[in-house]
Amino acid sequence: MSNIILVGFMGCGKSSVGIRLSYSVKKTFIDTDKSIEKAVKRKISDIFALRGEAYFRDLETNQLKKLIEDKEEHVISVGGGLPMREENRALLKELGTVIYLKANVDTIYNRIKKNKKRPLLQTPNPKETIKELLEEREPIYESIANYTICVDKKRFRQIIREICALCK
Ligand code: S3P
């Protein structure tokens, strides 16, 4: 299938890039977090608080399975933790071209610091949490990506130009 899937850490710009990219490549945009919120009629933070992370991770896998059945092609932005599950990695590969939007700790921290919507970063030292999680996740993102694009200090326009050149 030739969906374009954006993976990467929280705050790397997957949704902001994804929506703009979808206009450029004339595919519809899907954000798995938004699809989950719509499906269960709850915010991500409430899902974590009320049902726990494991339940949320099952919802992510269900969303990917639905997308596999979908005949239409999309630009898909997935939650930062979704590729950590092995089953999800196989589904992502099946879905299309995987692009890793790679951002460093400072870029991520600056983008998320005022936002309270991400349950995993509501810790006493979010920067340290980002550092630890990124160390664990980066090799996984790299292992599934067809292409990696460094997004630090880049405008959306430039990132989209790079993705379009790669996905021609
Ligand atoms: C998560 C990332 C979030 C959301 C949830 C968990 C993670 O999505 O799925 O808060 O584990 O990295 P974004 O990457 O879009 O922030």
Image: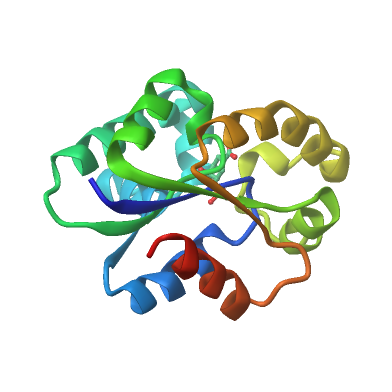
Residue sitting nearer the eye, 131 or 114: 131
Residue sitting nearer the eye, 155 or 48: 155
**Where in the figure is residue 107, as x and y percent of width and height?**
79, 59
Left or right relative to 83: residue 115? right
**Where in the figure is residue 101, as x and y percent of width and height?**
61, 53
Image quadrant of ligand 1?
top right
- Quarter of the image with the C terminus in it: bottom left
**Where in the figure is residue 50, as x and y percent of width and height?**
47, 32
What residue is rendered at 78% in x and 40% in y? Answer: 130
Residue sitting nearer the eye, 64 or 100: 100
What residue is rendered at 27% in x and 68% in y? Answer: 27
User: From the viewer's perspective, is residue 111 above or below residue 144?
Assistant: below
User: From the viewer's perspective, is residue 48 above or below residue 150?
Assistant: above
Quarter of the view holding residue 65: top left
- Quarter of the image with the N terminus in it: top left
Left or right relative to 145: residue 121? right
Left or right relative to 146: residue 76? left
Residue sitting nearer the eye, 113 or 102: 102
**Where in the figure is residue 132, as x and y percent of width and height?**
80, 30
What residue is rendered at 39% in x and 47% in y? Answer: 97
What residue is rendered at 33% in x and 72% in y? Answer: 25
